[in-house]
């Protein structure tokens, strides 16, 4: 065999060996790239999964916060309603108690008025009469300061909310259902009737 032929075969074998080595390297690099790609996908999927899990935990915490906030608002509203209701009940109890005391004082005022009306002429300036008149005026002023006011009756249209008709008369000088005379004075306390006026009404 000629030397040239041997060298030619050796060169071909070397080329084949180099091609195989190149193919092997290419395959190895492809495998590495594939593994790297799937590794990135796995890593990204893991991060997404972690993110989703974290997001779920965060949503649950937000729901708890909203629930507690709503519960607190309801509790505060209930307490505010309770406070208003309690204040209203206290005010009503105070008014009931005050009206009860006023009802017991009014007969004393009536007796003062009757006593002053029976003072004989010429004795209005006596010490006793003036003293009784001063006590009467002080009592009426004290009741007025507390919110007690007399009900207007004579000459006013009859109002069953304030007047109690015990007699009726025919009087052409007065209009129909007009109070002609007052037998007992009525009083109101803070726009609430303590005692109705006892009156005579013209038909």
Image: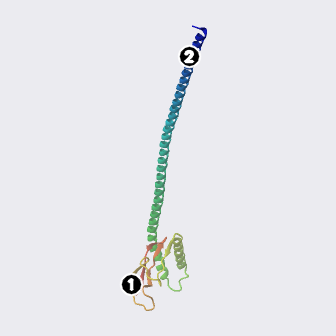
**Which residue, given by chain and number where applicable, does mark 2 sit on?**
17
Q: Is residue 33 left or right of residue 114?
A: right
Report the front residue among 50 and 151. Answer: 50
Q: Earlier in the sequence, mark 2 or mark 1?
A: 2
* Residue at the outermost front position: 2
**Which residue, given by chain and number where applicable, does mark 1 sit on?**
167
* Residue at the outermost bottom position: 172
Q: Residue at x 41, y 84 (%)?
A: 200
Q: How is the image coloured?
A: rainbow
Report the front residue among 51 and 4. Answer: 4
Q: Could you tell me if the residues under marks 2 and 1 are in contact, i.e. CB atoms within 8 Å?
A: no
In the image, residue 71 lies at what x, y percent?
A: 46, 49
Q: Residue at x 45, y 63 (%)?
A: 93
Vertical relation: 67 (above or below) 88? above
State which quadrant residue 131 falls in.
Answer: bottom right
Report the front residue among 101 and 129. Answer: 101
Q: Quadrant of the N terminus?
A: top right
Instruction: Kindly report the distance in space between the C-alpha atoms of the residues bearing marks 2 and 1.
Output: 140 Å
In the image, residue 49 lies at what x, y percent?
A: 49, 36
Describe the element under mark 2 as helix, strand or loop. helix
How many marks do you count on the picture?
2
Vertical relation: 53 (above or below) 79? above
Vertical relation: 43 (above or below) 164? above
Report the front residue among 134 and 129. Answer: 134
Q: Residue at x 51, y 30 (%)?
A: 38
In the image, residue 113 lies at what x, y percent?
A: 48, 79
Q: Residue at x 50, y 32 (%)?
A: 42
């Amino acid at each position: 065999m000629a030397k040239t032929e041997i060298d030619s075969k050796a060169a071909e074998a070397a080329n084949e060996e180099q091609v195989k080595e190149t193919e092997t390297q290419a395959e190895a690099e492809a495998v590495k790239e594939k593994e790297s790609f799937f590794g990135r996908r796995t890593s990204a999927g893991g991060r997404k999964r972690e993110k989703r899990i974290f997001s779920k935990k965060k949503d649950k915490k937000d729901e708890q916060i909203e629930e507690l906030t709503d519960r607190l608002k309801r509790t505060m509203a209930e307490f505010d309603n309770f406070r208003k209701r309690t204040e209203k009940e206290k005010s009503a109890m105070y008014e009931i108690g005050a009206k009860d005391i006023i009802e017991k004082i009014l007969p004393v005022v009536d007796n003062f008025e009757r006593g002053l009306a029976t003072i004989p002429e010429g004795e209005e300036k006596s010490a006793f009469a003036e003293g009784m008149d001063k006590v009467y005026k002080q009592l009426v002023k004290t009741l007025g300061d507390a919110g007690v006011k007399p009900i207007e009756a004579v000459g006013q249209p009859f109002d069953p909310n304030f007047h109690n008709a015990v007699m009726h008369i025919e009087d052409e000088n007065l209009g129909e259902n007009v109070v002609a005379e007052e037998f007992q004075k009525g009083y109101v306390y803070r726009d609430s009737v303590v005692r109705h006026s006892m009156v005579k009404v013209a038909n």
